[in-house]
Amino acid sequence: MFEIKAKDNMGRVGVLKTKHGDVKTPALMPVIHPRKQAVDVAKYGADIVITNAYLIYKDEDLKAKAVEEGIHKLINFDGPIMTDSGSFQLSVYGDVEITNKEVLEFQELIKTDIGTSLDIPTAPFVDREKAESDMEITLERAREAVEFKKENNIEMLLNSVVQGSTYLDLRRECARELTKLDADLYPIGAVVPLMESYHYRDLVDVVMNSMKELGDDTPRHLMGAGHPMIFALCVAMGCDLFDSAAYILYAEDDRLLSTRGTYKLENLQEMPCSCEVCTKYTPDDLRAMPKEQRRDLIAQHNLHVSFAELRLIRQAIYDGSLMELVEERCRAHPALLEARRQLGLYSRDLEKYDPRSKKSAFFYTGPESLLRPEVIRHLEKLREMPKKRDLIILPPTRKPYSKFTTGKLGEFYIYGEQHEIDLDDADFMVLDIPFGLIPLEIDEVYPLSQNDSPKTRDVDSIEFIEDFINEFVEYYDQVLIHSRVIKDLDIGLYDKYESSQDIRYAKDDVKKVKAIADYQFGVGAGEALFTGNINIEKSKKTGKIRHIYDGKVLIVNMRASDSYLILSKEGAKRLHNKMPYPQNRVVVNKDSEPFALEGKSVFCKFVVECDENIRARDEVLVVNEEDKLLAYGKAMLGACEISQFNTGQAIKTRKGMK
Ligand code: GUN
Ligand code: ZN
C-alpha cells in the first residue's frame, strides 16, 4: 500500500496506493469545503484531497447527496479522498454531535478512501492529567476503529492520530500503541497551535518523538500543516502528507504564502512569484477587485507555491540535497532556525535512515550543517577505525587531499608529550570543516571529498572541531599539528612549537584500499578482502583506482563517483568468510533462498534479520538462517526499514552465488 522510491535524511519519496489511484508523496492534500469550494485544486497538482465528514454529516442536503452518490461525486473529485472526523471541530467548539462509531460508519457509507477516527486534539502545554486522559480516549477510539474495520471487512483505509500534547513521552507512548494496531496511516495531531504560534522547536520535539515509535512502512501525515515554509523541515523529519486549508484561509485574509513566509496584500508593491496570478495581476489590480475574485486568485497563488515547493522537495530527495534545502528554508525565520538546531539533537535518529552515499555533494550552509547525519556518522566511524601510535594533522588543500598533499610538509607543532615520530606508525589526517579529521587513505570516499564549505571559517565550526580533536587525541601517544592548521584556523590546539619537521605522506595503494574497506564494511574487512597477490588497476584517464584483483581474480571494483567498493563474487566470499555474523548481512527465509541464489532481488517480506548498521546504498551479503552466503547486492533501504517493511525491494542483488 505504501512503497518508498527514494530517501534522504528521514524524508522519503513514496507511492501511496488507493482504490482511486496512486499518490506520490510527500503530498499536499488541499482541504475541500464540501459546500463553498471555488478553486479547482487538481489543476495545481493535487492527487489527493481532504474534506470533512462531520460537516457533511451535519448538513442534511450534503449528507443525503453523499450517501446517495458518494463523496467523490459530492465534491467532484475522482482521485483519492481523505476525510476528517470532526475532531478539529471538537477542539474548537469543545463538543461534537457524533460518536466515534457513527463517524466511522458514515465515512464508510459515503465511500471515503481514507477515514479518520474521532481523536481528541489536545492543545499544547495543557496539564499532564488532561493530556493523559485525552490520549487514552484517542487510543480507545483508534482501537474501536480498527476493530470496526476488521469486523465489517471494510476497504476504507484508516487514520490513527498521534496525540499527547507537548508531553514527549506521551507522544511516544501514543505512537507505540497505535503502531501495534496496524492502522494504514498515522497522522500527527494537534500541531496547528504550535505552528500558528511559531513554536517550531516544540513542533520538532513532538514530531520526532512520534516518529521514534511509528512504523516506517506507513505514511505519516502532519495534520493541519499547510504553510510551504515548513514543508522541507517536516519532510526531513519523515512526514509524507500535509493538508492545507491554509491556501484558502490565508486567501480569505488577503495573505499570500511563500517559502519565505507570508505577505500581506496591503503591503505588497510587487507580486511575490511568477505563477499565473502573479504575472497577470499587480497588487493594485488585486486590491481593486471584488473580495471573492481576489480571494480565489490568491488561493490559486497559494496552491501554486505549495505544490511547487513539494516538487522541489521531492527532487531534493532524489538528489540527496534535502538538508541543504531545509537549512535554506530555515533561514526564513529565527523560530525556524531554532527548529533546525533542535533537529540536530535527533541526528542519530536521522542517521539511521540517511543513505550512505548521495548523488549530490554535501554543501555546508552554516554551523547547523555540523549536526547533519553525515558528520555524526563519520566521526563515529573515525572513533572505531584502527589507530597507529601517533597522529599527524595536516591542513586542508584542494580535494582529494591525498592527491595534493605531497613533498615536504613544513612546520609542526607538537601536541602532548614528545616522542620520536615514527612516520610508519603514524596516522595522517587532514583537518577540515565539517568532517573534522579525514584520514588520507579514505579521503575520496563519499562525502569526505564530495563536500564544500567556505574557506573562511565560522567560530562555531572551529569550536566544534576543537572539541572533537581534544577528545580524539586521547587515542594517540603524540600528535603533530601542521603550523598552517593552527594559523589558518586560529585553532588553540598546541603546547609547544617544533620547527621544520620534514614529514612526507607516503602514498600506498594497498593501505588505501584496506582502509576504505575497513571504513565501509567494518574493521577487519581490509585484511579479509585483500590478501594474496594484490593487483590494483587504475583508470588511464583519471589515475583513480578502478579494479582490485588477487592475481587475475577480481575482488572488488571501486565506484568512481563515491569511491565505495563494489564486491565481486570472490569479494563477497572473502568478506563473508572473515567478517563475523551478523556484520554486513541480510538474512532471508527459506522461501526466498532459491531466488536469492539465482540473483533475483530480495524483498523486505523475506528478510528475517539484518545487521543494524546497514544503510541505504550499502553493499551487503545475503545469507540464509544458517549464515550460508546466497548472494550479494546493494541495500535499497536502511536496516530498520528492511526489518519492518512487508512490501518493496530490500536488496538489489548484484549476483547470486549459484
Ligand atoms: N486537523 C488538525 N489537527 C487535527 C487533529 O489533531 N486531529 C484531527 N482529526 N484533525 C486535525
Ligand atoms: Zn504567485
Image: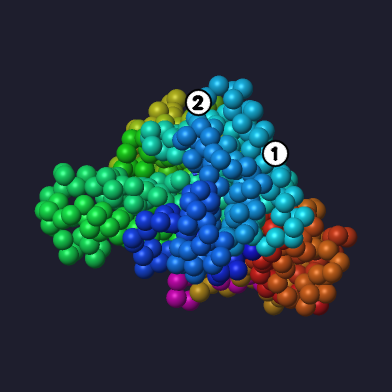
Q: Which residues are magenta?
A: 540-551
Q: Which residue is mark 2?
A: 125
**As shown in the figure, which amino acid type bears the numbered disc 2?**
Phe
Secondary element at image label 2:
loop
User: Any magenta on residue 314?
Assistant: no
In depth, the one of 463 and 256 nearer the eye is 256
Q: Are marks 1 and 2 in contact (CB under 8 Å)?
A: no
Q: Residue at x 22, y 44 (%)?
A: 264
Whether residue 220 can be seen here: yes
Judged left or right of residue 240, residue 502 is left
Q: Residue at x 50, y 35 (%)?
A: 91
* Residue 286 in the image, given as x and y percentages of width and height: 16, 55
User: Any magenta on residue 548?
Assistant: yes
Judged left or right of residue 538, residue 260 is left
Measured in 3D between alpha carbons, the distance from the residue under mark 1 to the one under mark 2, in whole angstroms, is: 22 Å
Q: Is mark 1 within 8 Å of ligand 1?
A: no
Q: Residue at x 70, y 72 (%)?
A: 601
Q: Which quadrant of the structure image shows residue 555?
A: bottom right
Secondary element at image label 1:
helix
* Residue 608 in the image, given as x and y percentages of width and height: 80, 57
* Residue 295 in the image, given as x and y percentages of width and height: 26, 54
* Residue 404 in the image, given as x and y percentages of width and height: 41, 56
Q: Residue at x 71, y 45 (%)?
A: 144
**As shown in the figure, which amino acid type bears the numbered disc 1?**
Glu
Dot 1 alpha-carbon crowd within 10 angstroms: few under 14, some 14 to 19, many 20 or more: some
Q: Quadrant of the C terminus?
A: bottom right
The disc, 1 or 2, on the residue closer to the chain's N-terminal end is: 2
Q: Which mark is residue 140?
A: 1
Q: Given the current orientation, which residue lies at the most extreme right position?
A: 626
In depth, the one of 96 and 132 nearer the eye is 96
Q: Quadrant of the N terminus?
A: bottom right
